Amino acid sequence: MTRPDFVYHFKRHRLDGQGTRFDLARYEGPGCYAPLVCPLRRTGEPIVYVNRWRLPPGAAPDPRKGGLILAAPGKAKGERGRNLSSIFEPSPERPGWGFGDIDRKDAILTHREEEPGALTVHVFLGLGLQAETLFQAWQTGGVALDLAPAPRLA
């Protein structure tokens, strides 16, 4: 059974539902997964943004892009943030559950909960470009979302 290497838990910065900023609450895994630890320039606290793609008026959405963007803040004053991943949420039976790739190297499965304002990101190292397959395998029970158990010492 496939299991994630890291699990990151974020909380919405403003609980009124208007903000797109999520603050890192905690993470599980060996060490730190650098692409998801994005410090805010002013305070240094790790955050990510979840936004919808902005389309010009009359433009059709690009089917190669997910409906949402997982983004990091800019590092310098005036610098725009960088996109970490598109997030596809294809299943109406499981709203808020999605998948994406970070740098085309690592796959992620995401879970957004609108009511409590939470975002969970499950990172699968080295499985880039296989996120959709992981998502489908998760739906059929082939992927567990808890971390792999630590190896037993003899």
Image (cartoon, rainbow, N blue to C red):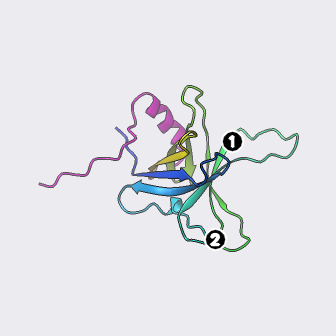
x and y, in percent, of residue 134 in the image: 47, 38
- The numbered mark at residue 64 is 1
Q: Residues within 10 Å of mark 2 (few under 14, many from 20)?
A: some
> Would you place residue 102 above or below residue 137 in this image?
below
Q: Is residue 128 or residue 46 the one in the foreground?
A: 46
Q: Is residue 51 magenta?
A: no
Extent of the magenta region = 127-154
Please tell me in which quadrant of the rendered image residue 132 appears: top right
Q: Residues within 10 Å of mark 1 (few under 14, many from 20)?
A: few
x and y, in percent, of residue 4 in the image: 40, 47
Residue appearing at x 71%, y 65% in the figure: 80
Q: Quadrant of the N terminus?
A: top left
Q: Is residue 26 or residue 136 the one in the foreground?
A: 26
Q: Is residue 133 magenta?
A: yes
> Would you place residue 58 above or below residue 75 in this image?
above
- Going from N to C along the chain, the mark reached first, 1 or 2, is 1
Q: Amino acid at mark 2?
A: Lys
Left or right relative to 26: residue 51: right
Q: Secondary structure at mark 1?
A: loop
Please tell me in which quadrant of the rendered image residue 42 appears: bottom right
Identify residue for label 2. Answer: 75
Residue appearing at x 59%, y 48% in the figure: 15
x and y, in percent, of residue 70 in the image: 61, 51
> Would you place residue 85 above or below residue 44 in this image?
above
Q: Quadrant of the C terminus?
A: bottom left
